Image: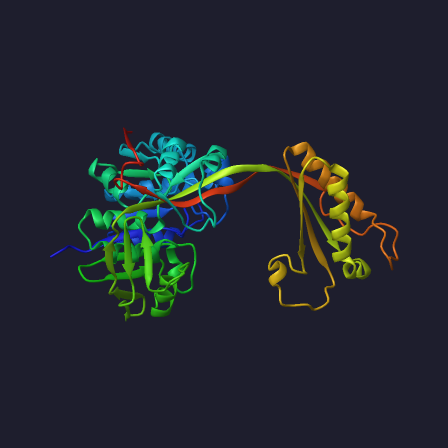
Amino acid sequence: MMDAITVLTPTGTLGYGFGDEALARGMALGPAVIAVDAGSTDPGPHYLGSGKPLVSDVSIKRELTALIRAGRRAGIPVIVGSVGGAGSGVQVERTAKLVREIAREQGLAFRLATIRSDIPIERAKRAVAAGEIVDFEAGSPLTQDVLDETVTLVAQMGHEPICEALDGGADVIIAGRACDDSVIAAFPIWRGADPALAIHMGKILECGAFSAEPFAMDVMLGTVHEDSFLLEPGSMARRASVKSVAAHSLYERENPFKQSGPGHEIDLSGCSFEQVGERQVRVRGATLTETADYYVKLEGARLAGYRSIAIAGIRCPTTIRALDTILDDVRGKALAYFAPAPISVAFHVYGGNGVMKELEPETAPQREIGLVIEVTAADQELAHAACHQISGAMLHYHYPGIINTSGNLAFPYSPSDLDLGPVYEFSAYHLMKVDTPTELFPVRYEDL
């Protein structure tokens, strides 16, 4: 009979915080591993393309220090996946550097494993030529030309490379891009747990105490048994309920009964959720089927240009009534002014339809508008010039029915036009067939 295996997930994203009391109580419950996700595509392609970290080094180092110290005291591994936000090689090395600093400053000795997830462009080109790439959510095929424009390409690893690092005696694992649930499921699977239960539990735990009431970026624990898993929050100020756990089981899921991942598909149609006391929920019923071929998800980013923005407020009622006409005219004149140099101009009208755009159902009159002027061009100088030309033109724009002769816009900042630097867009969001689950994800060890 399998021994119970408890996983402590301290937060939904490393660097987003957790309570000291929640961590202390969670560690007192005797977890076998600390596992946490550190990335996502939710913030867009910038962190993948630029290599910049999603969360500051200050926050990452502070939280890693607490987790590594707790892990070393308890003699259990600490696993972090999708480090840096996108899990690129430069982000893996940046996080590993912080771990080395922590080991030195805290006087700790342990084995560090780093797992890269960068995919050589030539490897992806061979897959394209062999017909081993399928669209995931990109909406267009991955081509050799698109790959030539790609500056960073990673793949989402499953649990297998992390299990390999555990086989190698790793105490701290810093992994590149990884499936969120696999980061949490890896240790229980390595110890012999049912993969279906472990991965389903990982899916619920990936956001920390978002599956608790009240939800928060905080500590959550899951214990895998032979036929079920049990969830509870670390903090006594929270509780797991059937509603909160079942709801998070549906989180970010297109199909409520199917959970797909590298090399497998999990059927959740037979799941049950049972309240255990006031603070725990037991989950049963997930089953796993291995797929005929093993595919990993590719995520690639390419440079799309350079961006400048201006932020302004509009309070004049006549300007607000004429705003759609003004924006169309100003955009057209800017495109003509800078021709033949191509520029992209976008307006985001907050208080109008800045969030929903053309899907916005509300048409009530607006009293105050927040306007973001966004210009993307081939270089920063051109983007800045066009942004300033547009903001200046709007400031003094004359339209039928105007009362004031200038001052259509109120700028909260000086300078009014802000350069945001390079802009990246996703170039790859596809699935690639691989021969083995670990072939693309090399493990490197260091004894600190």
* Drawn side of residue 314 relative to residue 279, left or right: right
Q: Quadrant of the N terminus?
A: bottom left
Can residue 134 be seen here? The reply is yes
**Total labels drawn:** 0
The image quarter containing residue 309 is top right
Image: 49 above or below 290: above
Can residue 212 be seen here? The reply is no
Colour scheme in the image? rainbow
Residue 49 location, x and y as percent? 49, 37
* Drawn side of residue 415 relative to residue 240, left or right: right
Residue 16 location, x and y as percent? 45, 48
Given residues 254 and 88, the one toward you in this image is 254
Residue that lies at the very extreme toward the left in this rendered image? 1
The image quarter containing residue 107 is top left
Residue 105 location, x and y as percent? 37, 31
Query: Residue visible at 72% across and 50% down?
Result: 312
Q: Quadrant of the C terminus?
A: top left
Residue 195 location, x and y as percent? 23, 53
Query: Residue visible at 70% across and 36% down?
Result: 384
Query: Residue visible at 19% across and 56% down?
Result: 4
